[in-house]
Amino acid sequence: MTRTFRTSKARHSSAPTPSTPTLASHTSGGSEPGVADLSSVGSGSSADAGSSGSTPLTGGTGPGGRWSVLLAVLAAAALAWGAALAAGAWAGASVGAATDGAAGALTLALVRLGFDLTAALTVGWLCVGVLWLPPRHSGAATPAIRRACRAAGATAVGWAACSALLLINVWGQRAGGIALLGGLPQPSGPGMAAELGNLASAQTGYLISLGLAAMVALLSLGSGSEPARVVMLVAAVGALVPRAFIGNNADPWNRDYAIDATLLHTVSAAVWLGGLAAVLTILYRGLPASTYRTAPAHDDGTAAGPDAVMAALWRRYRSAATVAALVVAGSGLVLALVRLSGTSPLRSAYGRLLLLTVGLTVVAMAALLVVRKRFHGAPGSPPRSRAGSLRAGLVEVALLAVAFGASAALGVIVPPGPGHQLTAAQSILGFDLFGPPTLWKLLWYWRFDLLLGGGAVLAAVLYLRGVRMLARRGVHWSGKRTTAWLCGTGLLLLVTSSGLDRYALSQFSLHMILHMSIGMLVPILLVLGGPLTLALRVLPPAGRTGVPGLREALLRLLHSRVVRFVSHPGFAVPLFVGSFYAIYFTGLFGFLISTHGGHLAMNLHLLLVGYLYYWQVIGVDPAPRRYPALFRLGLLMAPIPFHSIFGLTVMNSRTLIAGDYYHSLGLPWMTNLLSDQKLGGAIAWALADIPTAIVVVSLVAQWFRNDERESRRIDRRFAAGRPDQELAAYNDMLAKLNQRDGSDPYQRGDPRG
């Protein structure tokens, strides 16, 4: 008989809809009153199975279930390794020419495959434990979450081992030219010493991955607290980042597109394959019975049943996997266009192998859409059939594992070059500048930023969707906030994807315009949009199942100690002011501007720090602390002298900032770098007044609105016969004074009466 989800009506029919949960409204441990004993779930005798004889989909495995799961994992790994071997053999002579021989290249491909698979499994299990499995309302881990984090720790050990092998291999290749596993492909060209694609930087990248993977393994030993789990997920994603800077992405031409696309591709593929493997394992083995004894509870003491927990896990995975598949497809297309450099894919081993990888990914996406539609039910619903879902999932895992194997072989083959000799500026920047900058070029010579530009477009779309959802409910949302948000995201898209960002890498003055826009103008507009308030109004609270969702996670984040610390003025203001001096007066700017990763990190830092600072000054969203208008005005005025000193110092300096970098570009129209730097200092000094004026106007407007709101509140209380306590106390004081001296306060000239 088909195995289906069944929900006990007796357990949920009398449970009222709970109110919006708070952080302290639920206990974090022990048995909740009114929770049914669900220890028999999956044994076939559960009350949820009822008289129909069907078994809940949350049931565990029978005897030998663990061995079956292990065999399935080994089979998928064998498929992936076989694909890597076949793909490397198919590449043939190109592999041997690019590295220390075909045997060494295949060995290197297999180790890289182990790196990718263990990384994907680690990220997948952490997505389950941190994002998809619902915790208790307090954020504490359930037994199922602890099991997922321990599984992530186990796979992180394998990840660290593969990182260590690759690190030793790079050490040997760098020290004496002896690559134990096979040499990394090394494209040549000027300016390569600054990128992570060369051997020294590959060594650094694998060392970072080793350290972060080891951190995940250690933290998994005590993953009961929510901050520890979040740190594990951040560390795992961070350990994937060096993967985008190693190997073929060292090719200087279109390096920015290659790195951004690889970052998106690597993380999305890890979420897709690793998340699928983790969810299928839980689907086959079942969740721990003790999970439901301490499940997220309602205010009335009833708990979420196993069906609700599994349905939430499945729904969240399906949404994430769909987005991940689309990102994998899009980023893979960008990588194909960049690395083939306009050549036919059939003319090179790299191109043929790339076509195979793309084909496997397309087939896996077809399986994701077609097979799931048959076995997995409608969106937002649990799977119809446990057996059918497992079969469909294993097919999908096999296809993705083969694609991973082919992708690992791609990493040891040098792709076709750009087909022309690159200049020094082209090798460092990765693109052409088309002569000196003009207003037309700054506005219309676009080069779309996949990360920041794509993030701006996505943020605008999600915001408009939230506004539309409120409108359907009949809830009004301020048009001014919508306008501010769209202006902020539009400005972010403009400054990161137009010709301004392209030329900002070549001239300090244009970079300073970019800096002031991303660090001050964009955060002001985004903060005035009130995205957190919109999210709290749009996201539904925990329903009858009591399963915490994004709204509860957002509330826990806003009340967390980390947010309280970073949003404190004693931290936010010095960070906002000190970023100018730390970046430009310590030599850090020369390193950041010379690499695409450094340039991206600098832009993200400026955006986040600016948003954090202006959130405290003019933020309309809820915050851990709310300050009076005069105090916020002081927060606004405090950095002004420091910004003026910074601008004047740059204007009067006779030492070039990042002089070696700008000299290496060799641009014929940049004959006086010091003069351009002085112009940049003047821009930093003058443009600071524009954000200040916008913030002052916003503060005054908020001040008046608060006074009007307070006046209306007092009027409503008087109309209802409940006068304001402060005003009533003031009137009582006047009455006592009147009784004491027998005079009318108006006759004494007191206008307050």
Image (cartoon, rainbow, N blue to C red):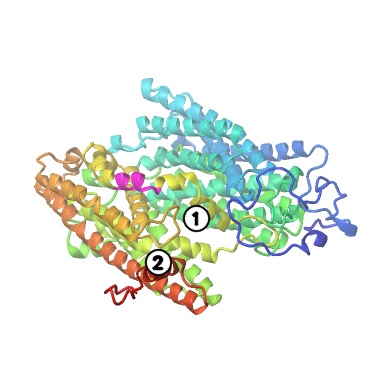
Nearest the camera: 652 or 314?
652
Q: Which residue is mark 1?
A: 327
From the viewer's perspective, tell me whether residue 219 is left or right of residue 486: right
Q: Residue 449: x and y, percent? A: 36, 55
From the viewer's perspective, tell me whether residue 399 is left or right of residue 671: right
Where is residue 49, by image quadrant?
bottom right
What amino acid is at disc 1?
Val
Q: Which residue is mark 2?
A: 733
**Quarter of the image that includes the C terminus:** bottom left
Nearest the camera: 366 or 601?
601
User: Which residue is drawn at the image coordinates 56% and 41% (left, top)?
Assistant: 229
Q: Secondary structure at mark 1?
A: helix
User: Which residue is drawn at the image coordinates 59% and 58% (left, top)?
Assistant: 319
Q: Report the magenta residues as a range.
A: 567-576
In the displayed structure, 210 sits above or below 23; it is above
Q: Residue 673: x and y, percent? A: 12, 46
Nearest the camera: 599 or 138?
138
Q: Residue 39: x and y, percent? A: 81, 45
Q: Residues within 10 Å of mark 2 (few under 14, many from 20)?
A: few
Disc number lying in front (2 or 1): 2
**Quarter of the image that includes the N terminus:** bottom right
From the viewer's perspective, tell me whether residue 178 is left or right of residue 217: left
